[in-house]
Amino acid sequence: MRLPVALIALVLSSPLAAGERIVAPGTGTLAAAIAAAAPGDVLTLSDGAYRGPVTIDRSLAIIGPRGAVVDGEGAGSVMTITAPDVRLSGFTVTGSGRINQNLDAGVKIEKGADRARIEKLSVTGNMHGIDVHGGRDAVVTGNEITGTDSPRMNERGNGIYVWNSPGTLLENNVIRFGRDGIFSNASSNSIYRGNVMRDLRFAVHFMYTRNTEVSGNTSIGNHLGFAIMFSNQAKILNNLSLGDREHGLMLNYANNADVTGNLVRGGTKKCLFIYNAHKNLIWNNRFEGCGIGIHFTAGSEKNVLSGNAFIANREQVKYVGTRNMEWSHEGRGNFWSDHPAFDLNGDGIADGFYRPNDVMDQVLWSQPAASLLIGSPAIQLVRWSQRDFPATLPGGVRDSAPLMRPLTLPVPEDILRYEAQAAGRWATGNFDDTDPDNFSAH
């Protein structure tokens, strides 16, 4: 029987004829569909459970609704990608193994699996959420990644783990629970932007990472916001650290970084911690409402601090060292909320310099028991003499051109709501305090 020409055209233009295959839920159905697929095919899932784990060893796309659940049932990584140009979109991935040493993950992108695209997945109940493990130019965007809140924090997996995977783009992901939100190790030339991370150890954690941008991210209620460690040429731009418990931003053996436009607010300990970090540009940031605004130590040299605002921190600066440090650049210093300044010529620069610490501060840092004498006449006499005879002052921080007005950095309304929730948890003690690490000692 001859088919009408219109019917033939309809069949040829059908998505199924173009390589789209409908995959029914069940045990082994997804693995069988992958084995039967040709490069370029699109496998479409529907609501229901798909038993894993599975390996994607050819270039194809797997798409589906959130109700389509690929479940690894506790065996290794749920979906392992070994081929280039694979796209996963829309569905749920759960049930990885629990062996941290094996980096069991919801989605694993292995070496050679270049240009993988992981988008709009719900990745929940796995050891690690997404492990970009050697694949180049991966795009991980718009995913909701929820880790576990047990056992101890250091024994959990990361939301996204990037290892030796240049060109990775992590964008607009929401990550909650687990160990670190984004852990970047021995990688380079990547961009991590627009991600929101809550209830973690570190929101972003760099180790041996080079030339990578971290921009427009939000860290809320974590132990530490942005930890840049043993890394070079990082760009830390326009991020928010709100209510992070230990440090908002830490530069630890980090060099040649550009730290600009960040807001750290409401941390219980330190807004900014700089430890043995050199040649960093730190400008136009706002550090507000922390126990210490900036803790600067371990011989850090040739850093430029300019245009920053230090507001209502209980102690603005803790400088541990004997050298003289100038914290202004080309006639522009920083704003200090505790500086009683005047500006008679109206140029926006205070007429007097700012010096946050004296020798008694250093004594009190090294000998906390001396705080019992803080109001004694002897200590008041030492401080008076240093104020009136500056030659007696030790080496320390000086801002020769303090600003009269602080910069402002806006926070979106939905993020303000999360910030209030985090502040409530810290105030009531309703947080996970099982991590044995003492970050303040780093």
Image (cartoon, rainbow, N blue to C red):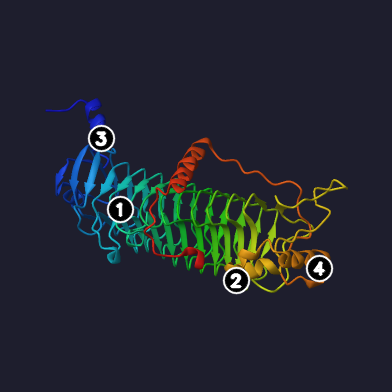
Query: Outermost residue toward the front?
Result: 377
Q: Looking at the image, do the residues carrying marks 3 and 2 touch, with CB atoms under 8 Å apart?
A: no
Relative to residue 167, is residue 97 drawn left or right? left
- The residue type indicated by label 1 comes to Ser
Mark nearest the camera among 1 and 4 is 4
The earlier-in-sequence mark between 4 and 2 is 2
Looking at the image, can residue 314 be seen? yes
The kind of residue on which mark 4 rests is Pro
Per the image, the residue denoted by label 3 is 12
The residue labelled by disc 2 is 366
| Mark closer to the chain start, 1 or 3 | 3
Label 4: state its secondary structure.
helix
Q: Earlier in the sequence, mark 3 or mark 4?
A: 3
Q: Where is residue 4 in the image (x, y as percent from the top left)?
A: 20, 25
Say which amino acid is labelled 2: Ser
Question: Which label belongs to residue 390?
Answer: 4
Percent position of residue 12, x then y: 25, 35
User: How far apart are the alpha carbons under marks 3 and 2?
Assistant: 79 Å
Could one spot residue 297 in this view of the protein?
A: no
Q: Residue 328 carries which label?
A: none
User: How busy is the neighbourhood of tag 2: few (under 14 within 10 Å), some, or many (20 plus)?
Assistant: few
- Residue found 68% across the figure and 63% down from its top: 304
Closer mark to the observer between disc 3 and disc 2: 2
Q: Name the residue under label 1.
A: 59
In the image shown, does 259 or 70 lie closer to the viewer? 259
Whether tag 1 and tag 3 are in contact, CB under 8 A, the answer is no
Q: Looking at the image, do the residues carrying marks 1 and 4 touch, with CB atoms under 8 Å apart? A: no
Label 1 SS: loop
